[in-house]
Image: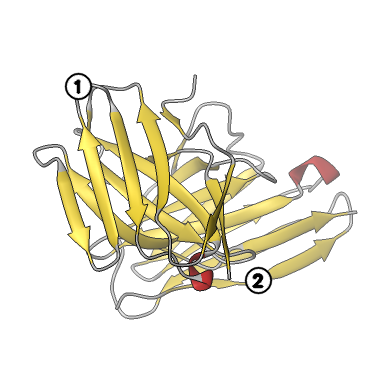
Amino acid sequence: DQQVKQNSPSLSVQEGRISILNCDYTNSMFDYFLWYKKYPAEGPTFLISISSIKDKNEDGRFTVFLNKSAKHLSLHIVPSQPGDSAVYFCAARRRTSYDKVIFGPGTSLSVIP
Amino acid sequence: GAVVSQHPSWVICKSGTSVKIECRSLDFQATTMFWYRQFPKQSLMLMATSNEGSKATYEQGVEKDKFLINHASLTLSTLTVTSAHPEDSSFYICSARDLVLTFGNGTRLTVT
């Protein structure tokens, strides 16, 4: 049973527009959520995170929103740039397992110049 | 920032042979490292947690005799795929935690 879901395997966005990547989770014990970016043949790179006590965290062009009641989070990238083209993994951590991060299947984002 | 180095980045081996993959934390000590496996177009699946000076903790369904993990120092963990078969072909990634989980660049294993 997949505890972290990313229902869109791919997304295409025009350069300069907003990219919205969605993520849903099923385990109510998750208390910390992360987004990782991954280029082909490389390991994932940490992008941004959010604690369950917040509903929004912003870092430059990247903003993550958390809706706990809906068990849903989203990553907004604005404005999107061609260099943002990568696979984005949503990940979640359980309250009792600090380092044991559960990953979603990823969404491949293509930003078209 | 924290750097995790993984070696080799790719390896091709024949069926039945063993392959060792190294994971090093370059500028921090990591008592715990993690090994993941990624199949094409699928998520990163945690295989095992590597603990310095003690036995690794394997996730359900992962054969510990197949995937040998050694964490002999605070900066090095190794994953050995023993008697590799074509179905072991995959992308293996390690991670360690400094302030956040930091990943190596992965190892592409192809078993022929």
* x, y percent for residue A60: 24, 68
Image marks 1 and 2: residues in contact by CB distance under 8 Å: no
A80 displayed left or right of A40: left
A19 displayed left or right of B88: left
For image coordinates 20% across by 28% down, the residue present is: A68
Q: Name the amino acid, label 2.
A: Ser
Query: In which quadrant is the N terminus of chain B drawn?
Result: bottom left
Q: Is residue B36 visible?
A: yes
- With respect to residue B17, does A103 lie above or below? above
Q: Which residue position holds label 1?
A: A69
- Judged from this view, the residue extending furthest toward the left is A53
Disc 1 is attached to a residue of which chain? Answer: A
Q: Name the amino acid, label 1.
A: Ser
Marks 1 and 2, how far apart at CA: 41 Å
* x, y percent for residue A112: 59, 64
- With respect to residue B105, does A50 lie above or below? above
For numbered disc 2, what is the local secondary structure?
loop
Which numbered mark, 1 or 2, is in the foreground of this view? 1
For image coordinates 34% across by 61% down, the residue present is: A78
Task: Classify residue B95 by image quadrant.
Answer: bottom left
Q: How is the image coloured?
A: secondary structure
Q: Residues within 10 Å of mark 2 (few under 14, many from 20)?
A: some
Q: Is residue A100 visible?
A: no
For numbered disc 1, what is the local secondary structure?
loop
Disc 2 is attached to a residue of which chain? Answer: B
* Numbered tag placed on residue B9 in the rendering: 2
